[in-house]
Amino acid sequence: MTREVVHENCYQIAFAIKDEVEDRENVGITVIQIDEAALREGLPLRMSE
């Protein structure tokens, strides 16, 4: 995987997490723990997406 592809995948994951966190904040949740396996495991994403 090229550096640019990894960079883009990281941004896509970050934006998805950001949206999920904002949804939870909007309903009053104030403590959120994030453990994203895709980042920890080196982006094991399907290439078709």
Image: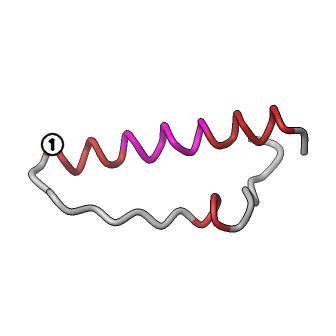
Q: Is residue 40 above or below residue 43?
A: below
| Residue hosting label 1 | 26
Tell me, yes or no, whether the highlighted magenta stretch contains residue 14.
yes
Residue 17 locus on image (x, y percent): 44, 47
At which x and y percent is residue 7?
72, 37
Image-based side of 3 in relation to 22, left or right: right
The percent coordinates of residue 35 (x first, y second) are 48, 67
| Left or right: 36, with 25 as reference point | right
Of helix, strand and loop, which mostly describes the magenta segment?
A: helix
Count of numbered badges drawn on the protein: 1
Residue depicted at x 83% and y 46%: 47
Q: Position of residue 41 (x, y in %)?
A: 70, 67
**Looking at the rendering, in which quadrant would you find the N terminus?**
top right
| Amino acid type, callout 1 | Asn
Give the residue drawn at x 57%, y 45%.
13
Q: Is 15 situated left or right of 9 in this image?
A: left
Q: Residue at x 90, y 39 (%)?
A: 2
In the displayed structure, would residue 48 be above or below residue 8?
A: below
Q: Is residue 3 magenta?
A: no
Examine the rendered structure and indicate whether residue 13 appears above or below residue 36: above
Q: How many other residues sit within 10 Å of disc 1, few (<14), some (14-19) or many (≥20)?
A: few
Q: Nearer the viewer, residue 35 or 47?
A: 35
Q: State the residue lying farthest toward the right.
A: 1
Image quadrant of residue 34?
Answer: bottom left
Give residue 39's quadrant in the image.
Answer: bottom right
The residue positioned farthest toward the left in the image shown: 28
Q: Residue furthest front?
A: 3
Q: At 53% across and 62% down in the image, what residue appears?
A: 36
Task: Check disc 1 and report its element: helix, strand or loop.
Answer: helix
What is the magenta range?
11-19
